[in-house]
Image: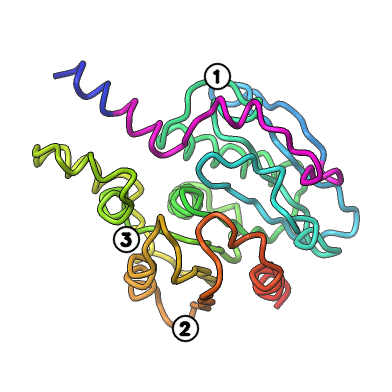
Amino acid sequence: MDKVYHYLQKQKNRLLFGSTKVIRNCNLGEFEVKPLNNIKLFINEEQLSVYFSNNKKAKKLLVWFGGRSEHVAWIEGMTTWVNDDYDFVTFQFRGTGSSTGEPSEKDSINDAIEIIKWAKKHYKHDQIVIAGRSIGTHIALSSFMEIKSKHKEINLEKIILVSPMTNLLDIIRNYKKFSFLLEISSKKFKIFLKNSLNNLDLVRHLNIKTLVVYTIKDELVDANQTKKLIGKIEKDLLEICEFEEFNHKNILRSNDCLSVISKFLNN
């Protein structure tokens, strides 16, 4: 049984984080974000590749968690978020980019919390915004819950969720590429998937300003999943931006999307 569970965990991690080899070999080219510094931090027994700005005018901090098979340094328009008010920090999940180790849901959340703590100490900014795209939304929400309960000295002011899902089981039901997993008849396996990336339980506890950005043409995270999440967030804290012309992969390449995020950050 332990061997089966270990196998399922390994397959789940591959499903969540994608092909790490592709990321390591990718040529960032024109999408390299030159204004960001890059260092290796030794966190939880692994070396993580961390990108960060050095804006002397900044008074706030934005911490970004990327998506599946995503080299966070290529995000177009990232420098538009790093304006005079904000510093910017992001990192590569274990086993992606030049970060060492093997990626997993649990370790990525623990690493994210340590990155936020490092950033708080490094910058000493009082106000912090956390943001994530796709799987990064789960990392952001889980980090929020942990910091809210155990690190109250860190002030999380806002959270941004781009293409957030309800849970892994719903993604598999929606995305044909992964649908073969539904042929596994085990109820325990379906519970295993449902408890993975379980944002539906996490959003109920949000008590800070929240921006949700999504597209109705998302081929991976069905828009109905995102709408279900939206229904669990307190309306007075919520801003919503729905697009029609983008998909899961290119929503962040839209100037319209980046403008929405920038406006939310600066209000």
> In the image shown, does 248 or 60 lie closer to the viewer?
248
Q: Secondary structure at mark 2?
A: helix
Point out the frontmost of discs 3 and 2. Answer: 3
> In the image shown, does 180 or 199 lie closer to the viewer?
180
- The disc label shown at residue 30, or none: none
Seen as rendered, the residue at the extreme top is: 3
* Residue under the image location 81 percent in, 47 percent down: 53
In the rendered view, tell whether residue 138 sits above or below residue 185.
Answer: below
* Residue under the image location 51 percent in, 62 percent down: 247
> In the image shown, does 88 or 13 lie closer to the viewer?
13
**Viewer can see residue 149:** no
In the rendered view, tell whether residue 135 sits above or below residue 86.
Answer: above
* Residue under the image location 53 percent in, 53 percent down: 152
Point out the frontmost of discs 3 and 1. Answer: 3
User: How much space separates mark 1 and mark 2, taking CA atoms?
Assistant: 41 Å
User: How much space separates mark 3 and mark 1, taking CA atoms?
Assistant: 31 Å
Q: Return the residue at label 3.
A: 200
Q: Earlier in the sequence, mark 3 or mark 1?
A: 1
Q: Quadrant of residue 25?
A: top right
Q: Position of residue 211 (x, y in %)?
A: 54, 71
Is residue 69 highlighted in magenta?
no
Label 3 crowd bin: few (<14), some (14–19), many (20+), radius 10 Å: many
Which stretch is magenta? Answer: 9-36
Label 1 crowd bin: few (<14), some (14–19), many (20+), radius 10 Å: few
Q: Secondary structure at mark 1?
A: loop
Q: Main secondary structure of the magenta part?
A: helix
- The disc label shown at residue 45, or none: 1
- The disc label shown at residue 236, or none: 2
